[in-house]
């Protein structure tokens, strides 16, 4: 089986799983937990095939290829995997309507647009830092999607128009609890990522890294304030949503934003 065919199957499984979850959300008669088994199985098949694609495209004798679109594909894979693992025990499956199709798009972009940026064998000690960074981005990406969903839910409930979409979601308190659990996980991982960055990167404030470093530290500070506000003042609702999205924007710019400018726009 060629990797092109594997990619087609993975993309199809991602899209089919997202479509089934979307149909499940709009159909009031299929909201019991048993109905999420099929899309989750399709999702697990997709992430398994996606992992094989990443291994084939990113690992070689020249080192690990962390080109922009390879990095986007790896990040989308980690987000999808974390989502699927979380969905086994927590009612977050509706996030798959966005997460799974995005992973399908990432696979397509990885093949359609070549991007090479190799991490040489001599820099393999950076793998721990990179892995922690991607895991942190994955957890906080899911938290950002959760915050957007929470914002929609709050608005509909405030306007007293809880339609079928809103009734399909868990209670508001459960949604907020899940949000802060994911933020806490992402914050811990990001803290470890920053620590390993200072340890393994010789000059973390070098010219090509300074924007990434400052934005990462800014995002970390935003999430730290948010968690402190939640613990000390009981922050919730719009306040929690705004801080969550603010931290995520800074985090997104710190890695993918700087990587896009350096590799795609400037060709470095």
Image: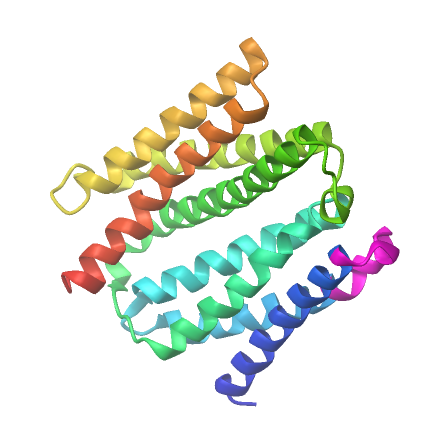
Q: Position of residue 32 (x, y in %)?
A: 87, 52
Q: Is residue 267 above or below residue 207?
A: below
12 on left or right of 129: right
Q: Is residue 124 above or below residue 133?
A: below
Work out which residue is located at the far bottom of the displayed protein and give it: 1
Q: Residue drawn at (70%, 32%), measured in percent from left and top? A: 157
Q: Is residue 105 above or below residue 35?
A: below
Q: Residue drawn at (55%, 41%), measured in percent from left and top? A: 148
Q: Position of residue 48 (x, y in %)?
A: 61, 69
260 on left or right of 268: right
Q: Magenta: predominant secondary structure element?
A: helix
Q: Is residue 66 visible?
A: no
- Tell me the magenta residue range: 26-39
The mark total stands at 0
Work out which residue is located at the far top of the displayed protein and give it: 232
Q: Position of residue 153 (x, y in %)?
A: 65, 37
Q: Is residue 80 above or below residue 237?
A: below
Q: Quadrant of the C terminus?
A: bottom left
Q: Residue drawn at (46%, 29%), measured in percent from left and top? A: 242
Q: Position of residue 213 (x, y in %)?
A: 25, 37
Q: Would you identify the image quadrant in which residue 158 lies? A: top right
Please state which of residues 166 and 196 is positioned toward the viewer in this rendering.
166
Q: Quadrant of the N terminus?
A: bottom right
268 on left or right of 220: left
Q: Would you identify the image quadrant in which residue 202 lies? A: top left
248 on left or right of 186: left
Q: Is residue 97 magenta?
A: no
Please state which of residues 193 and 8 is positioned toward the viewer in this rendering.
8
């Amino acid at each position: 089986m060629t990797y092109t065919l594997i990619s087609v199957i993975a993309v199809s499984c991602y899209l089919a799983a997202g479509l089934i979850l979307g149909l499940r959300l709009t159909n009031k008669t299929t909201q019991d937990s048993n109905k999420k088994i099929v899309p989750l199985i399709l999702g697990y098949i997709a992430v398994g095939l996606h992992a094989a694609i990443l291994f084939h495209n990113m690992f070689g004798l020249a080192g690990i290829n962390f080109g922009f679109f390879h990095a986007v594909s790896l990040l989308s894979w980690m987000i999808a995997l974390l989502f699927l693992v979380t969905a086994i025990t927590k009612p977050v499956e509706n996030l798959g309507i966005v997460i799974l199709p995005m992973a399908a798009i990432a696979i397509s972009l990885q093949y359609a647009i070549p991007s090479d940026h190799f991490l040489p064998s001599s820099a393999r000690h950076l793998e721990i830092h990179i892995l922690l960074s991607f895991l942190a981005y994955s957890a906080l990406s899911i938290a950002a999607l959760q915050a957007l969903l929470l914002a929609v839910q709050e608005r509909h409930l405030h306007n007293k128009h809880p339609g079928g979409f809103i009734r399909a979601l868990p209670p508001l308190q459960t949604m907020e609890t899940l949000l802060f659990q994911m933020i806490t996980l992402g914050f811990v991982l990001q803290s470890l990522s920053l620590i390993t960055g200072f340890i393994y990167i010789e000059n973390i404030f070098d010219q090509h890294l300074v924007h990434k470093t400052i934005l990462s530290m800014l995002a970390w500070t935003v999430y730290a304030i948010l968690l402190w506000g939640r613990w000390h003042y009981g922050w919730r609702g719009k306040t929690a949503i705004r801080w969550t999205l603010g931290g995520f924007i800074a985090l997104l710019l710190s890695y993918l934003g700087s990587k896009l400018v350096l590799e795609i726009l400037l060709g470095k």
